[in-house]
């Protein structure tokens, strides 16, 4: 299903139902499978992990205490994380920033779109006062832009020379989803 009036195109249904759940320390090996992939890490702020020790520290110090950081799982896959999605508060209580990452084996299958839809459906009900979820995407990352568009986010603008990412100054596209937008979950 797509949101009417958003100009969205039909999406492929993921091979399995996408679920979101809290991470645990026991997820380190599953997370290492995609967090160590240079292609997965390329558009992210972090470098690929080379061992589980720093990844375990990241899960312990950043993921577990985070107010809204979830594992992306596929039903029937032993509840093993194939990616992660987070909604991070900003200095303004009415706004939060969305981030997501997905194992390369699941790219192009609708998994990221389904995860974004589920996250947005949940977060507005769970985070008091939240009115807007934003996502910033490198202008060169067309696939991630399509994920957001298919999930019902609206493209707002290109922010020229907005940030430094891995040593390069990047133009970013800002997308938003507000609390009055219609959320459709697969």
Image (spheres, rainbow, N blue to C red):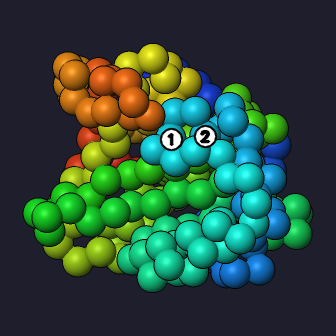
Residue 100 placement (x, y as % from top left): 52, 49
Do the residues bearing badges 1 and 2 touch, measured as CB atoms within 8 Å?
yes
Residue nearest the viewer, comparing 28 with 134: 28
Residue nearest the viewer, comparing 83 with 94: 83
Give the labeled residue for mark 2.
41
Secondary structure found at label 1: loop
Residue pictured at 31% horizontal, 33% vertical: 164
Residue pictured at 39% horizontal, 30% vertical: 167
Q: Classify the position of the N terminus by image quarter.
A: top right
Crowd band around label 2 with a 10 angstrom C-alpha radius: few (<14), some (14–19), many (20+): some
Q: Is residue 54 left or right of residue 141?
A: right
Secondary structure found at label 2: helix
Residue pictured at 75% horizontal, 66% vertical: 52
Residue 126 placement (x, y as % from top left): 35, 77
Give the labeled residue for mark 1.
44
Asked if residue 154 is positioned above or below residue 87 in the image, the reply reads above
Residue pictured at 61% horizontal, 40% vertical: 41
Asked if residue 160 is positioned above or below residue 45 in the image, the reply reads above
């Amino acid at each position: 299903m797509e949101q009417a009036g958003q100009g969205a195109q039909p999406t492929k249904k993921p091979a399995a139902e996408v679920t979101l759940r809290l991470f645990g320390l026991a997820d380190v090996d599953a997370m290492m499978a995609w967090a160590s992939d240079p292609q997965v890490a390329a558009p992210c702020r972090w470098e690929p992990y080379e061992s589980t020790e720093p990844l375990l520290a990241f899960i312990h110090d950043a993921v577990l205490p985070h107010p809204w950081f979830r594992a992306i799982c596929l039903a029937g896959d032993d509840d093993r994380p194939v990616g992660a999605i987070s909604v991070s508060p900003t200095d303004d209580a009415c706004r939060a920033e969305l981030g997501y990452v997905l194992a390369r084996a699941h790219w192009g299958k609708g998994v990221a779109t389904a995860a974004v839809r589920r996250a947005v459906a949940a977060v507005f009900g769970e985070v008091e006062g939240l009115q807007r979820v934003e996502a910033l995407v490198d202008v060169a990352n067309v696939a991630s832009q399509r994920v957001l568009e298919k999930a019902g986010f609206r493209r707002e603008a290109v922010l020229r020379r907005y940030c430094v990412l891995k040593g390069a100054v990047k133009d970013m596209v800002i997308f938003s989803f507000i609390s009055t937008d219609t959320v459709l979950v697969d």
